[in-house]
Image (spheres, rainbow, N blue to C red):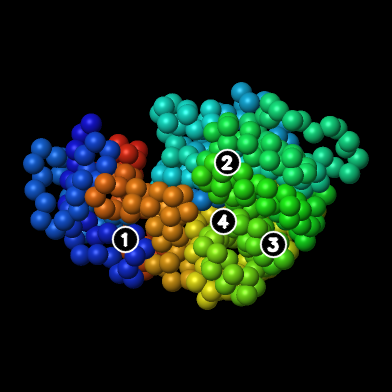
Amino acid sequence: MSSYLFANARIVDGTTPEPGEPVSVLVEDGVIREVSASLKAGSAEVIDLKGRTLMPGLIDCHVHVVASLANLGENARLPDSLAAPRAAIIMRDMLARGFTTVRDVGGADVGLKHAVEEGLFPAPRLFICGKALSQSGGHADFRGQYDDTPVPTNRFRLGALGRICDGVDGIRRAAREEIKNGAEFIKIMANGGAASPTDPIHFLGFSRDELLAVVEEAQNAGTYVSAHVYTDEGIRRVVECGVHSLEHCNFISSETATLAKENGAYAVPTLVTYEKLVSEGASLGFPAESVAKADYVRSGGMKSLETMRNAGLAMAYGTDLLGNMHRHQSEEFVIRGRVLPAQEVIASATSVAARLLRMEGKLGTIAADAFADLIVVDGNPLEELSLLTGQGKHMPVIMQAGRFVKRVALD
């Protein structure tokens, strides 16, 4: 594999409020070998950034790469032969925006992960939970009130974001099967949701016994549980039961945010999806009642950022977009920047996200021994977060594992 020396690079990684002084970064064999102001190129190809910003590859901790349709009930009925190539295109476009790693929180399976690892198509590094777990009538149950079709127990279609399980024995078995099938963490639906037809937002998913059981199964496998939660009551009960990753959190109170912080949990807000579901969802097939639920959830989003920041609760970057709305993935930066300092917003997609993925030191940083996932940005994102939007148009260089995904000549 070729070696490269990025010279005169100003690093922005979310650890400081200003770009670093110019340094050189040596990349060899897919990893960063050294970062120093006085590196010699040797046999490495020199890429003079001339003071441009160099960032770690971005990380999105809440995606659904198989969600090519906004109507998730219809998406679950797609044949795998159609869902898979659509997912490949969705991931290709994520990588082109500078997202070199994503965490799929419902849908993607180990076959898709292996396809990415084999380099069958350009895509971010993919971390998966397999199918999200939902109780009957919960957020992954898309049967309407008049539909009494038996729920499947195996051979789930790729386009299905979740699977249904009930009771302590049922949730244990489902968690064990997902882990056996390659899941790197477990996702549960612990509140009602916008996309599903029979569960208002305030509904609580699973009993406490079921929650304790799934957390134990994850811990037995050396991993953690992620939970879809909106309401303060829903968040508090999953934190008390040991859930580690809290998705959405739109109506969290300061007391619950403090409890989550004390328990070492992470939050993954996903504000951009509510804005886009309300403005574009109906035209993309999102049911009217679901649009109304998304609008309700949107109302608490911005306040939740302030609440969690004041409590010191770590927040990773997430988007949760569906269908044609995936193109708005980078706009979460700008939305969060209305409330949070740019440094913290960038950290959410670099170092904080890497810690949640348990990849600290390998992802989300520019340091020796880290993976060479790098993006070059024209301008300073600490001053203008919108430089991270625009489908990568401000990123002349994107590198993943030491290979160029995009390389435009630098003036």
Q: Amino acid at mark 4?
A: His
Rounded to the nearest angstrom, the CA distance separating label 3 from label 1 is 37 Å
Q: CA distance from mark 4 to mark 2?
A: 14 Å
Q: Pointer 2: what residue?
A: 129
Between disc 3 and disc 1, the foreground one is: 3
| Labels 1, 4: front one | 4
Say whether disc 1 or disc 4 marks the residue closer to the N-terminus. 1
Q: Which mark identifies residue 237?
A: 3
> Which one is earlier in the sequence, the residue at label 3 or at label 1?
1
| Secondary structure of the residue carrying numbered label 3 | helix
Nearest to the observer: residue 324 or residue 125 = 125
The type of residue carrying mark 2 is Cys
Name the side, left or right, on which 29 lies relative to 253. left
**Residue indicated by mark 1:** 12
Q: Which mark is residue 244?
A: 4
Q: Is residue 318 above or below residue 185?
A: below
Choose mark 4 or mark 2, whichever is in front: 4
Whole-angstrom CA distance, mark 2 to mark 3, is 21 Å
Could you tell me which residue is drawn at 58 percent across and 32 percent down? 180
Q: Disc 2 or 3, which lies upstream in sequence?
A: 2
